[in-house]
Amino acid sequence: EKVEERTIDELAKKTIEHCLKEGIETVWDRSEMQEPQCKWCSTGLSCSRCTMGPCRIIPERNRVRGVCGADADLIVARNLLDMLTTGAAAHSDHGREIAETLLLVGKGESSGYTIKDTEKLFAIAEEYNIPTDRAAIEVAHDLALAFLDEFGTIKGELELCRRAPDATYAIWEEAGILPRGIDREIVEAMHRVHMGVGAHYANMLLHGLRTALGDGWGGSMIGTEVSDILFGTPTPVESMMNLGVIKEDQVNITLHGHNPMLSEMIVEAAESEVMQALAKKNGATGINLIGLCCTGNELLMRRGIPMAGNHFNQELVIATGALDAMIVDYQCIFPSLPRTASCFHTKIISTSQKAKIPGSYYVEFSPENATEAAETIVMTAVENFKNRIPERIFIPGKPVAVTAGFSVEAITKALGGTLQPLVDAIASGKIRGAVGIVGCNNPKIKHDYGHVTLAKELIKHDILCVETGCAAVASGKAGLLTPDACFLAGDGLKGICKAVGIPPVLHMGSCVDCSRILVLLAALANTLGVGIHQLPVAGAAPEWYSQKAVSIGAYFVASGVYTVLGPMPNISGSPAVIDLLTNGLEGVVNAKFAVEPDPLKAAELIITHIEEKRKALGI
Ligand code: BF8
């Protein structure tokens, strides 16, 4: 029954059982070993940021202030701002690397990268008033500089925020949370958490919104846009998902992490005749590339590459015994993966100088050496095929079909060239509203249960779901990402999905692609002539764990989107902070957070909210 408590992913269940039998440790085992978790840390009431401490707030023992004098509200707010800022930095640093790659392309100095979507390049260049009556490469050069300027701008305002509807933009100006530059807000946030700087919890957290906006409308948005320019804007594509995508007779290579600049080059290398021939020479029938987590989402969206799963599938895919290499860059990669892999022949290959992992093979990857590094990596994987131990291979079943690739451009095209049909369907009530379900897996929630239960409940109530990250993968494994899943939707949504030929749950990409959701919201709001906060929409992160998810939740709310979290953030030690986030923010940005671990109850909250917004709009 341990297995039933851990996941709803049927193939994961079988593999976890296999791991338990074989003594292969997984995230669930480690989570159990951590019980009971520290109650001060989980309420946000411990602080170890300076050496006068560490301190804990224990009111019943009259410890109401840290050594520096910070009270519970400040300690909780400081911890939360730190967490949010880490997440914003992670997304934005990824965005910067992609923008730097675009600059190298513009200078003609990159290794193997080209511009795949010239139309998008030119369209965005025009937003920045960059002349487009010249060669794409020159435009790319100037656009890359304009993007990089968004990180450390001295202009005093993030240009991409102009994409927001006027009413939303005005709210940010009024609240003083319009980001000035991506890095600037991150640095200022870290300044504010230093002892003796930020002293007012609300003042700290408002800066958190500003920092998060710099991520959503800045760093992440740049990550998405430049990836589209370099690798193509996604269009609907069919593929397969779950641990069953592993193929016994092929070299299996998993691409795990986040930045497509690595994985795209691996795909190029693996598809080459030389590597295919090498695979055959080594006894395999071919090379099977498999995605995991957000790198997997990027590859699925653009190339239809199958996915082994989401965050909590990362150890299980190794446990199949048929994985020849797992290639990682950064973020959401368990540092213990080489330990897991040491039970098998699998090689973990790390590639980023920001994320070296003890016990992994390291092949440094950069835009300047991309082609060569990708070839070395694929070759290492291919040559490892012969080291498999056939009797240890455990492939738990067959994969399920998915349709992905729903960029805003693809959605607009599917609707006949404008978003008007979607707006009309919402106005007529056939579709009641839309919800962005995003985020991770967390052992505090049964794996995939939060995502899948919430999505099913919402589509049943004629609410369209748009998803990214590990939420989208959960839906994929559960069969919700195909047009056939329409039968689970209410009559109104079912009718629209059937007419357009789309699934009721749309896969919009990786976590940085939550920026696509912002662009979609802005377009919907502009079509209706309202602010984002007036739309019948909501956000949800039913199984979130990461700092990045805190930043996403914060920029959703700051953009006017009511957002329901599954796991409780570590803030319960401060009723004032809870009240600000779940109530007070409404008066600042016209949106707020809610926390509800039960996805059915979360659906109720969301449905009520959507109906209220409809009423206010008079639809
Ligand atoms: O950026 S959803 S577990 S993989 S943090 Fe990580 Fe969470 Fe997955 Fe992608 Ni996002």
Image (cartoon, grey):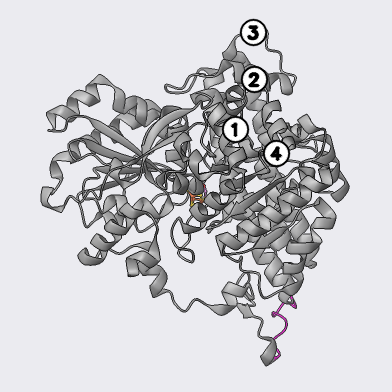
Q: Amino acid at mark 2?
A: Gly
Q: Is residue 413 left or right of residue 588?
A: left
Instruction: Name the main secondary structure of what is drawn in magenta.
Output: loop
- Asked if the magenta segment contains residue 64, the reply would be yes
- Vertical order, 559 against 128 (above or below): below
- Percent of width and height locating residue 426: 70, 37
**Secondary structure type for disc 1:** helix
The reply to whether the residue tagged 1 has its Cβ within 8 angstroms of ligand 1 is no
Gap between marks 2 and 1, in whole Å? 16 Å
Marks 1 and 2: in contact by CB < 8 Å? no
Residue 513 seen in the figure: no
- Percent of width and height locating residue 396: 25, 50
Residue drawn where x is 71% and y is 26% of the image: 420
- Percent of width and height locating residue 89: 60, 48
Residue at numbered disc 2? 417
Residue at numbered disc 3? 134
The local crowd at label 4, few if under 14, some if 14 to 19, many if 20 or more residues have their Cα within 10 Å, is: some
Q: Is residue 439 left or right of residue 528?
A: left
**Magenta-highlighted residues:** 62-70
The reply to whether the residue tagged 3 has its Cβ within 8 angstroms of ligand 1 is no
Residue drawn where x is 27% and y is 57% of the image: 14
**Secondary structure type for disc 3:** loop
Who comes first in sequence, dot 4 or dot 3?
3
**Secondary structure type for disc 2:** loop
Residue 158 seen in the figure: yes
Marks 3 and 2: in contact by CB < 8 Å? no
Residue at numbered disc 4? 152
Residue at numbered disc 1? 496
Q: Amino acid at mark 3?
A: Arg
Who comes first in sequence, dot 1 or dot 3?
3
Gap between marks 2 and 4, in whole Å? 36 Å
Who comes first in sequence, dot 2 or dot 3?
3
